Image (cartoon, grey):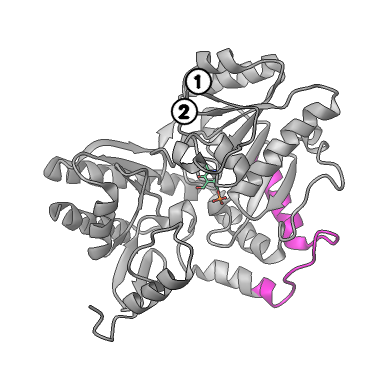
Amino acid sequence: MNNGNDKNTDLKSIYEDVMLPNYAPADFIPDRAQGSRVWDKNNKEYIDLGGGIAVNSLGHSNPMLIKALNDQANKLWHTSNYISNEPAISLAKKLTELTFAEKVYFSNSGSEANEAAIKMARKFHHDRGENRDEIIAFENSFHGRSILNISLGGSEIHKQGFEPLLSGIKHAKYNDIKSVENLISNKTAAVIIEPVQGEAGVYQADKNFLKSLRDLCDATGTLLIMDEVQSGVGRMGYLYGYMKYEIDPDILTSAKGLGGGIPIGATLTKNDIASSLSTGTHGSTFGGNPMACAVSNKIIEIVSDTKFLIEVQKKEELMMNLLLEINSETKTFSGLRSSGLWICCDIKNADAFDLLDKCYENGLILVTAGNKALRFAPALNISEDDIKQGLENLTKALNQL
Ligand SMILES: Cc1ncc(COP(=O)(O)O)c(C=O)c1O
């Protein structure tokens, strides 16, 4: 019962009155945050090891990002895409210098970045007079919630009731090159793959599988799209996950950590593919917004530094060692996987959402992966102290199960 001082409960009850029921958010409402610490409306402190689902790449209220945002906010907010702007040009320049790509298209989210990627792939073949419009995606994949992206994704629950879905999409088995060979044909425009399946529970692609997939795409004239919306911008301890696999995609999509909390999406590709999205063929009102691009410029400048990425790999090791210790005491996890500061624990005997509530009670923010796993995707610059404190809070939650 609300005693009149519970600001979280007051706001939550308004939320239930006025918001669609498609989310089931936590009972607390965050009020302010700094680095990897968050305080709710009642001033309770939480350690944030969820990072807004791999979005808050440089933590909350990062002074360098606030400065980049404020400086830009005082200069220019929006131009429309009939007129360009310097932050967008400079961000595209950085991304092309640092990756396989030669051209960049900006949007506002991962779903939109994928939309541009698929349109580009189909148009590329169309412009060559080829009748190739099919897409191969993977079982258990996640690409977003638009009709295109639920059609690409592997989750039945995301699709039910939203049919008809987009036709021409086939699903292969992840890490199984034979299953891709069985589906690929002269009708296939592209294969879209996450280098690590994040929503499914941080499952990595095998190096040999991705190399064979690259070879298969080359041999059949199929474009390889890597969805790096969750894996990109330092999450895996590499600027982009594909760099770990020593192959280049033809098209790459990026979002989430690219904006550190400001909405931005990007689709990266090579010149010969980019030319298929000729003037007037695709667009977005807010894509390439100067304020989002100003923040993202700063993030890419910081995260692309090799020393920063090595630190991410060291923090992965620290977190994994601590989680292994916790599991040897509590025996709650049946599996533990990591790929950079991106970790998943399969839970033996509890529902992930019940455990998440216990974490919240004990001052820890995390995310789930399905209802049987916990996912960690903290700020890439999280301190060792915050990692340790967060995992102490996790231990308290596990001991209350
Ligand atoms: C791999 C991947 N692709 C695409 C998306 C969709 O991104 P957004 O929610 O920004 O549309 C997500 C979101 O979780 C994702 O993890």
Amino acid type at circle 2 is Ala
Give the residue at mark 1.
Answer: 209
Q: Position of residue 88 (x, y in %)?
A: 73, 57
- In which quadrant of the rendered image does the N terminus lie? bottom left
Amino acid type at circle 1 is Phe
Q: Nearer the viewer, residue 11 or 71?
A: 11
Q: Nearer the viewer, residue 298 or 338?
A: 338
To which quarter of the image does residue 131 belong?
Answer: top right
Q: Position of residue 397 (x, y in %)?
A: 19, 56
How far apart are the two marked residues, 1 and 2, measured between alpha carbons? 7 Å
Q: Is residue 397 above or below residue 113?
A: below
Image position of 358 (left or right of 75): left
Q: Are marks 1 and 2 in contact (CB under 8 Å)?
A: yes
**Residue range highlighted in magenta:** 71-99
Element on which disc 2 rests:
loop
Q: Is residue 55 above or below residue 138?
A: below
Name the residue located 72 percent from the left edge and 57 percent from the top edge. 288
Name the residue located 40 percent from the left edge and 46 percent from the top edge. 341
Residue 205, which numbered label? 2
